[in-house]
Image (cartoon, coloured by chain):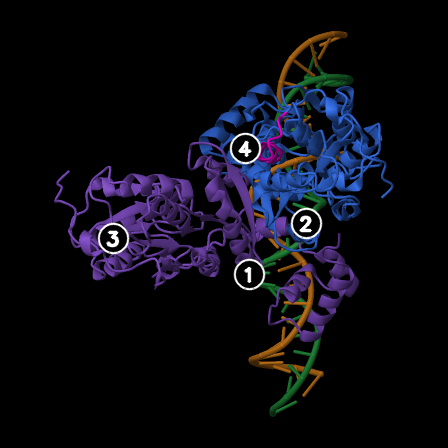
Chain colours: A blue, B purple, C green, D orange
Amino acid sequence: MATLKDIGAELGLSVATVSRALNGFPEVNSQTREKVRQTAERLGYRPNRVAQRLVTGRSGMVGMIVKLNPDMSSDQTFFEVVAGLSAALAARDTDLVLAVDQGTDPVAAYARMLERDILDGFILNAPVPDDPRVAFLQSRNIPFVMHGTTGEAADYPFFAIDNHAVSRDAVNLLAALGHRRIALLNGEQRYAFARDRAEGFRQAMPVPVPDHFMAGHPPSELAGYAQALTWLSGQQGPRPTAILCSATPQAAGVYRAAKDLSIRVPHDLSVVAHDDGFPQMPATGFAPPLTVTQAPFRDACEPLASALLGCIEERPARDLQATLRADLVLRNSTGPVPQDHKTPWPNSQS
Amino acid sequence: MATLKDIGAELGLSVATVSRALNGFPEVNSQTREKVRQTAERLGYRPNRVAQRLVTGRSGMVGMIVKLNPDMSSDQTFFEVVAGLSAALAARDTDLVLAVDQGTDPVAAYARMLERDILDGFILNAPVPDDPRVAFLQSRNIPFVMHGTTGEAADYPFFAIDNHAVSRDAVNLLAALGHRRIALLNGEQRYAFARDRAEGFRQAMPVPVPDHFMAGHPPSELAGYAQALTWLSGQQGPRPTAILCSATPQAAGVYRAAKDLSIRVPHDLSVVAHDDGFPQMPATGFAPPLTVTQAPFRDACEPLASALLGCIEERPARDLQATLRADLVLRNSTGPVPQDHKTPWPNSQS
DNA sequence: ATCCAAATTCAAAACGTTTTGAATTCAGGC
DNA sequence: GCCTGAATTCAAAACGTTTTGAATTTGGAT
């Protein structure tokens, strides 16, 4: 293992000069710099990151705590998320490492990793409203970036989708097509994104929607199928003429329920879903092709990496916040409201 | 952030004494030790792990490189593996961190993590014969433990199942029941375990088995279903009277193919599978309940953690090697060979 | 040769911890 | 009090790197 000292000894230079040469300090003579570079390469010098971190406070490694989830369906996106982030960070000479959290305390795993004092910061995902991780990390001045946001007043770096607009854009489309009986098949209600989408939905709807036509479920085909069967069978009143899904697997379940009940998409039922661009269930693989609000996770990786490193470099949080408007992509799963289904649901104050 | 220096300043002790007191050196007076401990607790002292590693060379973190796998079925076991190992290591004050590898070069991700020089060692899994990771890590004196083994002459720490015995025990059982037409539905052939099971199978078989009744596939129900359909439909000659599966999802596929072809388990076809004890497809959930060679992964976690830490402490590799014999658990998927199917496959020299 | 300013390099300290071996303190015996 | 051995603590060095500010070198003008 070659050290700066070895390089210096061979060239008759001080450790300080070798360090400055390798780190691009401009006052180092260019010939000296080249000799140092070549010797370092020949000796196979690799910086001791631990020593660097002791001096600079930075190791070049950031962490992500992965919450174990008994519902395995969400794990199908896990590797896409991690691969995208790893690549974006690697492009910035930063390594992403994961630790697994099995407990019930949201912050315990962070506390544990902070004991090591090795990681430069964290990437947080799946925020819940008033996410306790935020206060915990802020109180310790630990850099982090959030994928998503916990609310309007977020005072930390984040990269988020405008989930109000996700619902609003879809509702506006369907309302323009004459739909009034629009059901919301949302994500799990404990997440902040689901809360935002429900809010956007309610605000955009031109008429009130009975509570039982707004439900929150995991992003699985089975959940979508079961909920759509209930709604489309008429058990709970006039069936919806459109369903707004939180994720493409839910939409697949809706398609299957519609088929089982001989309800045609889009003639009898319009379907819109949110598409994060994960390849497991592409919107283009639906028959008919699915209309979506589209925000590929792939596009979030670079901004997340950038924001986290900005936070580590102590740039102000407000410069590291971005909210993206999802694209509305029209395909063939949406059409005009059926002629005999134009009336809204009866007014319900429940 | 309190340091040793702060504690020493408050108690009028040297940094060396504070360090020795906190680390249990016996020559420190017990009253001194208690005063140091209380002050450390009051000041919220936490050791700087980076500084420790600079001196001791150890950080208390070990790594596992996760190879991205386009076939998602194996990911269903991923969290069981990681959770078990994390818990076993945590019990020894060691953190497991993961990094994701997307490339084709088996050692590149290790090289990259070694650039950081932060991790104390690695856990390796899914060994292939002559696994290049072994030579790479050994040439750099990097501690590691392998789950499984690459061969008889392994000169590194490992915890493995005796995969020869897995096949041999199953074959001996089926042969004792009169079966001669036994097919092997193995794991993917690139893995060392699959090679060992194939060897054990051939050596245990009392008669030769045509090559096309030995196949290697991923551990999925679909793969098991497709292969069993081919074999049981008679397309390739007399159908097997028993199938030995590499994993329980394959056995589920075999059950389904048998049902589709009106072949009764175990009356017409006996099925045995290897069961790693992952909860996704428990052998006890089969109808009829599945006979298995059983080696729960859960039982490997502690020995793997122990072996890795032993390696880090520079204990000799041969003291850190263990090979476990899987249990043979008889249930209702195996029975005597059908009376009209006692003849072996015709001798085939292909 | 001397002087001056710019260019370049260096010694030292810092980062926080561990450990070696020397220094100091303590306790008991004479 | 002095001596001795054991108990206890300490100063210094180490680990490898970065950075400050001083020291040294270089080059050009007079």
Check disc 1 and give the amino acid type: Arg
Check disc 2 and give the amino acid type: Tyr
Check disc 4 and give the amino acid type: Gln
Q: Left or right? Give the position of A346 relative to A281.
A: right
Say which chain tag 4 marks: A
Tell me, yes or no, whether the highlighted magenta stretch contains residue B295.
no
Which residue is the extreme one toward the right?
A349
| Front of the two marks 4 and 1 | 4
Q: Residue at x 76, y 25 (%)?
A: A179
Q: Residues within 10 Å of mark 4 (few under 14, many from 20)?
A: few
Range shown magenta = A254-265
What mark, if any, has residue A110 been given in the picture? 2
Q: Which residue is mark 1?
A: B92
Percent coordinates x, y for residue A275 in the rendering? 64, 29
Q: Tell me if residue B248 comes above or below residue A159 in the rendering.
A: below
Q: Left or right? Give the position of A88 relative to A106.
A: left
Q: Which residue is mark 4?
A: A280
Q: Left or right? Give the position of B193 relative to A287.
A: left
Check disc 3 and give the amino acid type: Gly
Q: Left or right? Give the position of B80 relative to B25.
A: left
Q: For numbered disc 3, what is the local secondary structure? A: helix
| Front of the two marks 2 and 3 | 3
Q: For numbered disc 4, what is the local secondary structure? A: loop
Q: Which residue is mark 3?
A: B200
* Mark 1 touches mark 3? (CB < 8 Å): no
